[in-house]
Image (cartoon, rainbow, N blue to C red):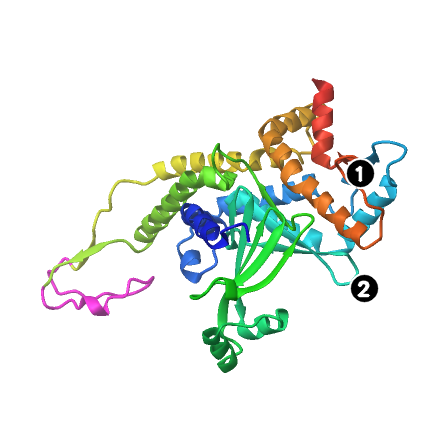
Amino acid sequence: MKYDLKQMYTRAINMREPWIRRWTDARRFVMPTTDEELATLYDATASDAADGLAACMYSLLTPPESLWLNLVPESVDSPDAEFATSVLRANLNDSNFYTTVHQCYMDLVTLGTACLFMAESPIGGASAFTFTAIPVTDIAILPNAIFHTTTITAGEIARRYPEWTPPRGIAEKMKQDSEYQMRLVQSLVDTEFTAWIDTDGDFENNIVSTGTFETNPYLIFRWSVASGELYGRGPILRALPDIKTANKVVELVLKNATIAVSGIWQADDDGVINLGNINLTPGAIIPKAVGSSGLTPLASGANFDVSQIILKDLRERIRHTLLADRIGLLSDKEMTATEILARNADMLRILGATYGRLLHEFIRPLCDRGLQILSRRGVIEKISLHGDAELKYIAPIAQMVAENNTLI
């Protein structure tokens, strides 16, 4: 083995660590998963706008049951590109691609990085492809390597890798409990695939599978990337300060509203009033001693109306960062054709770099992988995007780019 996989894996995990904290913050305000996160989420502006942007990317980049890609032969001697296009589209339509890719768009918008695993289905299936949206927290990447970690039971390990002979310590645990949880690491360095159980002991004896891939099954694509970084930055990460502030402002507004409804009261401690028996509800009769002031309201602090001004500004900035204001206007029936074209051009100026990156990191590798699987099965002739055919991306966003370039 020419790579020190264990050292590379450790380095990839260490480089990912700072991003885990950022992703946790982003998910907390957009896709909360625990009761505690839900209980402390007071403003849904970010989650609503993120869902709208993900749906927009879905319809602009990969609209279901629509012709959004086409292969054009490079020469008369090239394989039948039209047939290859129809077969590729048919297998994508018959697979779970359109139900899975939206999950990736949500990760792309929220975390800035998404991973779609494109596997080959067993012979006889409805489609040659099977897709899985891999959580970004399970992926660690280096410039030429991908590490995918997952938890798997001992019984599943034995069924999936029957030729593997586990070390004595692991074998005893697997024999005692088939539900024993183990950590499986799958690595792809260049084209070499290696899977091993991440436990203490000899690394070589923990390898359960090796092989090679002609094309990368891990389609990792990013929203935008800063120089020197491996993981992307999405609009939610950019808007995170505003999202946190808006959530805190709404929390304070609700606390202030609670005080406004129930009030803050004071009473003389005259030995007659039992504060434990006082119930501040409509129609309640609270006894007091003769000559005593009883319960009197305590004046609250300054009015918090300024919060509405701050909150409105924060929500507008969040929606602007997530393109919610532009997406909404595109469906306005009163807009003229010129206004729609101008709005499209404005949105493309923002999405232009992201569109180019997704075309290079997602659409093209998706086609490469699909054509390789289909040609290996003998369904189509072997065809390459690097010489035999040219990929013509004709999704709605590509048409918007073409119209904008025509106007320029």
- Check residue 230 in the rendering and tell me which mark sits there, or answer none: none
Which of these two is toward me, 201 or 251? 201
- Please say whether residue 50 is visible from this viewpoint: no
Residue ID at (63%, 34%): 355
Asked which quadrant contains residue 83, the reply is top right
Q: Is residue 185 above or below residue 179?
A: above
Residue ID at (69%, 49%): 214
The crowd level at tag 1 (other Cα within 10 Å; few <14, some 14-19, many 20+) is many
The residue to which callout 1 is attached is: 70
Assign the N terminus to one quadrant of the image.
bottom right
Q: Is residue 2 above or below residue 156?
A: above
- Please say whether residue 390 is visible from this viewpoint: yes
Q: Position of residue 300 (x, y in %)?
A: 24, 46
Single out the residue that lies furthest toward the front: 2
Q: Secondary structure at mark 2?
A: loop
Which of these two is toward me, 276 or 40? 40
Asked which quadrant contains residue 403, the reply is top right
Which of these two is toward me, 351 or 179? 179
The prevailing secondary structure element of the residues shown in magenta is loop
Q: Position of residue 343 (x, y in %)?
A: 64, 27
Single out the residue that lies furthest toward the top: 408
Q: Position of residue 347 (x, y in %)?
A: 61, 30
Q: Secondary structure at mark 1?
A: strand
Assign the C terminus to one quadrant of the image.
top right
Amino acid bearing label 2:
Gly
The residue to which callout 2 is attached is: 124
Which of these two is toward me, 105 or 36? 105
Residues in magenta?
270-293
Q: Is residue 48 above or below residue 168?
A: above
**So how many labels did they put on this image?**
2
Residue ID at (79%, 48%): 88
Amino acid bearing label 1:
Asn
